Amino acid sequence: MSERVVPPAARQRRRPTKQGVVLSEELIVATALRLIEEHGAEALSVRRLGRALGADPSSLYRYFRHTDDLMLAVTDELIGRTLRTWCPTGDWRADLRDLGLRMHAGALAHPRAAVLSSYRVTGRVYEIQAVETILGVLRDAGFPGAEAVRIYHAYVDQALAFGALDSASVALPKAAREAETAVWRATYARLPADTHPHIAATARHLVADMPHSSYPAALDLLLSAAAARLAEIRERREA
């Protein structure tokens, strides 16, 4: 793509595409997300996207400068989809746990896009809203600015990292996923106690736990540490 992005007010086509739809940024992003999930990252090309939309590829320049600009918009849309399903209650710890689990579920719903977007900073509307919202939850709970940012950083990076990790696993062919799961029972559960006493002692737990994501447990550990830190801050304030 190029640098010829048209201002938002002048973007909309007067005529529908060959498929009878009017182009918009939202439609392009939704179509790009679908192509990524169906065909992989290589699908995010101007030509393929134009074909899917029934539009001349050059018309996409009115909305996005280049494919990376479009990828950032896709990333921001994933954030927006999570935020639109989240209803905070005022309990900071419960709210952040719920939001984190929703972020993780959103990544698993779009595994190929999640792997691509997990390390991007968009600077777009939904990402800005997410940063403002999470920092607000932490500051309203009583965390001072520096602590709020430190916890926000760890919280978001943890969610993105697990989203990418688990999405990569989900994107594997079914046979490969099943083979990896079978390793815990076929290999680890059969190791003898005289050579691998700790694995042997916990084998049944490894078989039961390891095929599943550890994100919920990791999230709970992070939030427990944050709660302990908040208690320390409150004790110092009251002293």
Image (cartoon, rainbow, N blue to C red):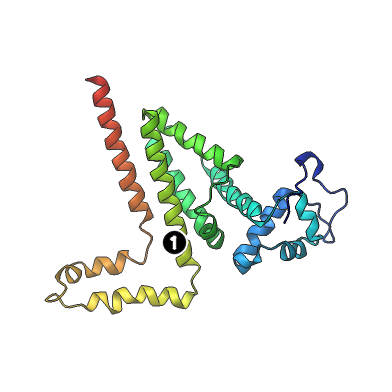
Place of residue 234 in the rendered image (x, y in percent of width and height, measured from the top left)? 28, 26
- Answer with left or right where residue 145 lies relative to residue 224: right
Q: Residue at x 44, y 33 (%)?
A: 137
Q: Residue at x 54, y 47 (%)?
A: 121
> How many numbered discs?
1
The secondary structure type at the circle numbered 1 is helix
In the displayed image of the protein, which residue is found farthest to the top? 239
Residue 35 sits in which quadrant?
bottom right
Q: Is residue 101 above or below residue 229?
A: below
Place of residue 174 in the rendered image (x, y in percent of width and height, measured from the top left)? 48, 75
Place of residue 20 in the rendered image (x, y in percent of width and height, measured from the top left)? 84, 57
Q: Is residue 83 above or below residue 107?
A: above
In the displayed image of the protein, which residue is found farthest to the right? 15
- Answer with left or right where residue 149 lies relative to residue 5: left
230 or 20, nearer to the observer: 230
Q: Residue at x 42, y 28 (%)?
A: 140
Q: Residues within 10 Å of mark 1 (few under 14, many from 20)?
A: many
Q: Residue at x 27, y 31 (%)?
A: 231
In the displayed image of the protein, which residue is found farthest to the front? 3
Place of residue 197 in the rendered image (x, y in percent of width and height, measured from the top left)? 14, 71
- Answer with left or right where residue 107 lies relative to residue 42: left
The N terminus sits in image quarter = bottom right
Amino acid type, residue under disc 1 in the picture: Asp
Q: Which residue is mark 1?
A: 166
187 or 40, nearer to the observer: 40
- Answer with left or right where residue 77 lies relative to residue 200: right
The C terminus sits in image quarter = top left
